[in-house]
Image (cartoon, rainbow, N blue to C red):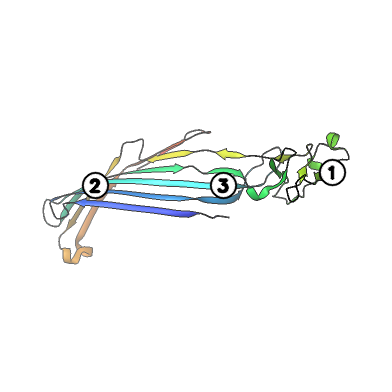
Amino acid sequence: MYNTVRRMTDTNLTLFPLSQLTVRAGYSQNIFGGPSLTPSGYQFAGSYATVVQEMQRNSTDNFTFGVDWKPVQGTKFTMEEEIDHLKADSYMTVNPSSLVVQEADGTKAALLANSYAQVAYSASNCNANSIGTTPILSAPNTPGALPVINAACNVMTSYLRSQPTRIILPDGNLPVPEHKHQECLDERRRALHCREYESAELLREFRGSGGDNARASDD
């Protein structure tokens, strides 16, 4: 379940578009964010699995710089450099709708029942040696408040899973150029008389926390 928004910005600037030498610069940003609900994907807090709230916050910043050289009519040489910076800042917390009980001190808590198998919460989730004949839930001191969970039962009061990731394309902070060569013998019949040559190199470097760094390169 997603309740997210996307915000996009695109700006481009071209200097001397009719001259032999044209300079271009651009910046684009794409932000995807908002709350969502997702299965935890693995068992945690003992042997239990549940639905958690994932706060989505992913964005990309794209910087482009290019130079076009037109020595003669119908021929254009282009050198273009581009940097993409990806920021993944999503994190997971307790699903607010799962906080259905409270501890004796008023701390809200979620019952640890396996949501994958839709197992109902029962006395098996409590310490049999400690619970005795005391009920699992008791009425709160304040009318209308959440029921109070027995201290001998398993609950979850807080959860946070975060792994901020930064990816820079191309490698590091230095851009990798892209070269283009275009010849058009007849602008009026561009589709039939244009030849284009293009070469580029792309390196990817992944930076994150909590795991091994991965690196790959494409030519």
Residue 192 at what x, y percent from top left? 21, 64
Tag 1 residue: 135
54 horizontally vs 177: left or right: right
Instruction: Say which mark, if any, is on residue 59.
Output: none
Type of amino acid under label 2: Gly
State if disc 1 and disc 2 touch (CB < 8 Å). Answer: no
User: Which comes before the other along the chain, label 2 or label 1?
Assistant: 2
Residue 49 at what x, y percent from top left? 68, 44
21 horizontally vs 168: left or right: left
Residue in front for this viewpoint, 1 or 139: 139
Q: Can you tell which of label 2 and label 1 is closer to the viewer? A: 1
User: Which comes before the other along the chain, label 3 or label 1?
Assistant: 3
Q: Secondary structure at mark 1?
A: loop
Q: Quadrant of residue 150?
A: top right
Q: Name which residue lies at 86% across and 40% down.
A: 134
Residue 144 at what x, y percent from top left? 74, 51
Q: Name which residue lies at 29% across and 46% down.
A: 64
